[in-house]
Amino acid sequence: MSTYRDRTSSHGSARATVLRTVAARGTSGARERRSHLSAPRVPTVGIDIGGTKVMAGVVDAEGTIVEKVRTETPDKSKSPKVVEDVITELVLDLSDRHDVHAVGIGAAGWVDADRSRVLFAPHLAWRDEPLREALQARLAVPVMVDNDANTAAWGEWRFGAGRGEDHLVMITLGTGIGGAILEDGRVKRGKYGVAGEFGHMQVVPSGHRCPCGNRGCWEQYSSGNALVREARELAAADSPVAQTILGRVGGRTADITGPLVTDLAREGDPMCVELFQDIGRWLGIGLANLAAALDPSCFVVGGGVSAAGDLLIDPAREAFHRHLTGRGYRPEARIARAELGPEAGLVGAADLARLVARRFRRATRRRLERYERYERAAAQLGLTPRGREVSR
């Protein structure tokens, strides 16, 4: 299993979000909004599990990645325990050099409302997998499990492009499209924990077949898979516009990848620029639909495809403005590229784990206090800790 390790001293802007006090909100809501401000300032590990890689890193309370390690994601055919073995190995490796207090996991799949089980992961063998319980038993520290788009949204809200936003929607463009909703400092997970699966909104009836089983899903038109599919189709047809990319891969269309298309688009290749305009337009159309339903103040676009920057974001903004309901008569949400890059999910997972560490510390302290009270009472009554009277 190949791995690499990076050590970094800084990671973007590590300034924490400053929340406004909203007196009209209920006491429990206010507590939840402020919860991250009272979390212990201890190092935690964040893990981002995608379709191709598992990345883990130690993150401090300011959102700075102190160290990160990465390895390939086990094949979908492998058992769930194989993935757990990979996660455990990475965490233990980092624990050799850092005092780890909790572990947060962002998984590319559906996670239940209790954030303990992965209900379904399209790229892994997880089907109703009790991941939190399995890992806590092996790591002996608190573990938090959440959807990877939720953790990325939290990371961007705390330390990245979403700082200061009260109503934020995160879109992650990778192999498919992930999404998350964050409102008033809380991730909206829905009744069953699976809110934000925007990639499977149907935008083209009877359109391209999606691995989910339906046709015409949004991610079939605006994602890394869509980008590569279109590039390969043009290359396979020996289109005149595809000659540059064909020359780059020696005529082997299977070697065309998303990063290659991105690099050629940056170099000005007309075909690759046009492909980004196409998926950017579909991105903007989808965002306009989400604005009609959710009315956020900001969309943050992340994931691997967002590395194209303005090649993607500019056509998305144009299409968003063109298709927005009530355009010209309503405020428009800001569309921003994620600032934390591919580490957003890792940073967010680690920060959410810090809240779990706080609850674990409180629960441990209460157990110790109860035990001490019991010991004092037992001593006064002349009982042993097992409740038997001491012989005189």
Image (cartoon, rainbow, N blue to C red):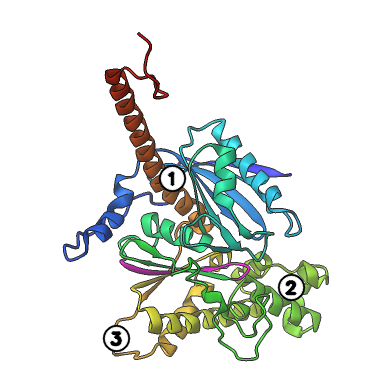
User: In this picture, is 132 found above or below 382?
Assistant: below
**Image coords of residue 334 (percent x, y):** 36, 74
Tags 3 and 2 touching, CB below 8 Å: no
Lower position in the chain sequence, tag 3 or tag 2: 2
- Depicted 141 relative to depicted 374: above or below: below
Disc 2 crowd, CA 10 A, few/some/many (<14, 14-19, 20+): many
Residue displayed at 58% across by 59% down: 118
Q: Position of residue 274 (x, y in %)?
A: 61, 81
Q: Residue at x 53, y 44 (%)?
A: 57
Alpha-carbon distance for marks 3 and 1? 37 Å
Which residue: 32% across, 22% down?
Answer: 378
**Which residue is label 2 attached to?**
245
In the displayed orientation, state which residue is furthest to the left.
23
The disc, 2 or 1, on the residue closer to the chain's N-terminal end is 1
Magenta residue span:
166-176
Nearest the eye: 162 or 391: 391
- Please state which of the two labelled residues, at mark 2 or mark 1, is closer to the viewer: 1
Mark 3 nearby-residue class (10 Å; few <14, some 14–19, many ≥20): few
Mark 1 or mark 3, which is nearer the start of the sequence? 1
User: Residue lying furthest right in this view?
Assistant: 251
Residue behind mark 1 = 64
Magenta span has 254?
A: no
In the rendered structure, which amino acid carries the disc numbered 1? Thr
Please, what secondary structure does the residue beneath circle 3 have?
A: loop
> What is the quadrant of the N terminus in the image?
top right
Q: Residue 26, percent across and down?
A: 22, 63
All told, the count of numbered labels is 3
- In the picture of the structure, the residue carrying the numbered disc 3 is 330
Q: In which quarter of the image is the C terminus?
A: top left
Secondary structure, mark 1, is loop
Q: How crowded is mark 1: few (under 14 residues within 10 Å), some or many (20 or more)?
A: many
Name above or below for residue 386 compared with residue 282. above
